[in-house]
Each structure stands twice: as structure tokens, then as C-alpha cells.
Image: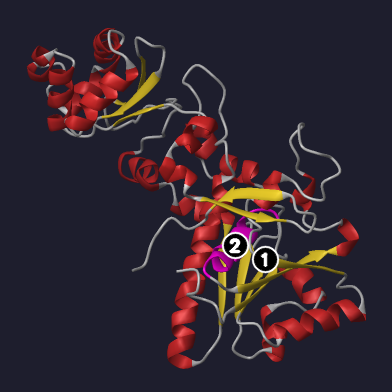
Amino acid sequence: MDEIFKDLVVIELSSVLAGPAVGMFFAELGAKVIKFENKNTNGDITRKWKLRNEDPAMPYSAYYCSVNYGKEVIMNDLSTEDGKSELTRWLKRADIVIANFKEKSAQRMGLGFEQIKKIKEDIIYAQLNGYPKKEKVAFDMVLQAESGFLSMCGTQSGEPAKLPVALIDLMAAHQLKEGILIALLKKYKTGKGSYVVSSLFESAIASLANQATNWLMNNYIPKRMGTLHPNIAPYGEIFETKDNAKIVLAVGTDNQFQKLCKVLKIEEYAESDMYKTNTDRVENRKTLFEKIEAEVLKLRANTFLEMCDLENIPAGEVKNMKAVFDDPIASNMIIEDQDENGNTRKRVKTIAFRVD
């Protein structure tokens, strides 16, 4: 599958996470991705976003490595004629440009869609904005706040909590990828290029899903519920086992609940008026939690999870990163390369699909 786009040339004029994630997607599928970085600022800002235990002498961070696999990096100064000429040479060969400049900045540098179209008429120009029709600095943390995610995340008694990855950036990357793929189909059919544009804010709003419809249809403003689900129970409740593991349940149907009661030997609760239907369980989730908690605490994690798997009850252990990548499926998603000094760099694939 890594040869699907082997003849495609992608110019990446973007930084941080969302745009580079799109570039890495095409690199993983075999495209030639040329990433231009600003020489005057020592490149992409995320090169400096290091953990405290990272080597300060390394010219990049683990964060930078996460979305910059398989690219040819050119440090360039677009304020010079030589810098502009080098970029122009590549643009003449390019199929796709990925950019996250502000519109006025792009125009000033001669890198807007209409300007690049004069260099390569059939170019697919993919523009990622923070907000539609608004030149405002856009970082994921602010977007999580302004799109409602922050108000929903965290525990009921605590402060709002951010999502632990820049998920708005990643969702925007998916939107832009989809737009580019549609533009490629159009190009193969008509020979014409396209201007593809998405924004972090719209991508965040598009991802609100059921939380948005709960408001739009029922005037229900989602509250912070930790891991719980407003519409389903027991869904998101976390239970401790006899061997101190933490297990989360995601029981989505009455049938699954009946099977859970069978596994825990509390069949009488499956027919109780308090817990028989999902509506009943949502209404009485606190007492239901206490009853399930007492039974799960009698079991070891492996025993309980094996019983759940046998009965097709959705359940899983709360794992840290080490435990996650001990799983062979997760470890098979690791891709590695080496820098010019022989240092090994690791990250996970952006691709989680197969096309046979």
C-alpha cells in the first residue's frame, strides 16, 4: 500500500501538527513529500517542544517526529530570491500544496492559491485555517475551549480538563485529507486542480456528534461527567479488580447488561425495575455502580476480562503507554527511521486502514 502515491509530489508549507499530519499521511502512502521549513526560525516550532528528559542538543523533539516521517526537509528563507526560486522549482513539479499560512501572509509572500496556480495550473492547494474568515491565532487548547470540548471534559466536581492530545488538530487533518482525496478524484476525471480549505474550528464542531444533537434537539447542555456517557449506563464507569487493575465497561444494550449480570452472578438485577432498561440504568447509575463495583472487586482483571470477552461484553483495562505498546497490534503500528547521525526515531502510523 505504501506505493499507492509513488508518483505524487506534495509540497508541505505548514507547521505544528495538523498540516504535517496530512503530509505524513501521503508520505506513508509513497508520495514524495517536500517539507519547507523557515531557516530563520530554525524550522518548525515543534522542533523545540521537548520533554524535560529529551536531549537539548538534538535538533528536533519527539513531538516533531510524530508527524514528520518520510519527508525530505528543506530549510529555506522565502524572503530571499534564492529561497523563492528553490520553492518555485518544486512547485512546478508539485501535485499538492499543503499550507497553513494566514491568507494575508500567503498573499504577501506570493503563496496564495491564485498565485501558485500561475506556476502550476492544475495544482491542488490545501489550505488549513484556524477559523473560517477570521485571521486569529489558533492553537488546539483554545479550540478545545471555544468548540465546547473543554466544558464537557473533566469530572463533575473538578475543573475542566483538556484532551491529552491535540485532537482538534488531528480531526482537522482528517478533514483536509478527505478534501484532498476528493480533489485528486476530480483531477483524475477532469485534469483540473482545486482549492481545498478547512479550519480547525469547523472540524471541531463537526466532531461534536451526539453532544451537539443532545443540545440541538433537547436543549441539553452537556455537563462534565468524567468518563461517563450521558445517554448510556453502565458506560464509562471504571471499576477496580481484586489485583488493583482498573476496568472500564461500555455496556450499550440491554442484552449486554443481562450478560454482565450473568457473569457477575447478579442475574436478579437484569430483571429489576431499577435496571431493566437503559433508561432505568441511566436514572439509577449510582446505585448500579455500587452493586457492580462490589462484584468486580472479587475478581482478578484477566479473569473478568476473559469472561466479558466470551460473552461479548465491551470491557477493557485502563492502560498506560507502556502497556498499550506491549500489545502486538499496537507495536505493529510503530514506524521507525534514522536521522543523518544514525539516531533512531519512532512514531505511530497515521494510517489505520488497509486496501486490498
Residue highlighted by disc 1 = 71
Q: Nearer the viewer, residue 282 or 172?
A: 172
Q: Secondary structure at mark 1?
A: strand
Q: Is residue 138 above or below residue 290?
A: below
In the image, 2 versus 73, the foreground residue is 2
Q: Which residues are magenta?
A: 16-29
Callout 1, which amino acid? Lys
Q: Is residue 101 left or right of residue 226?
A: right
On residue 24, which mark appears? 2
The percent position of residue 112, horizontal first and vertical second, equals: 71, 77
Placement of 307 over or under 47, stated as above or below: above
One can see residue 236 in this view: no
The amino acid on which the numbered mark 2 sits, given as a three-letter code, is: Met
Kindly indicate the quadrant of the structure image that contains residue 125: bottom right
Where disc 2 sits, the SS reads helix
Location of residue 31 in the rendering, given as x and y in whole percent from the top left corner: 58, 74
Residue 21 highlighted magenta (yes or no)? yes
Of all residues, the one furthest to the front in this rendering is 342
Q: State the predominant SS element of the stretch in magenta.
A: helix
- Give the residue at x 21% y 22%: 281
Q: Nearer the viewer, residue 236 or 153?
A: 236
Label 2 packing within 10 angstroms: few (<14), some (14-19), many (20+): many
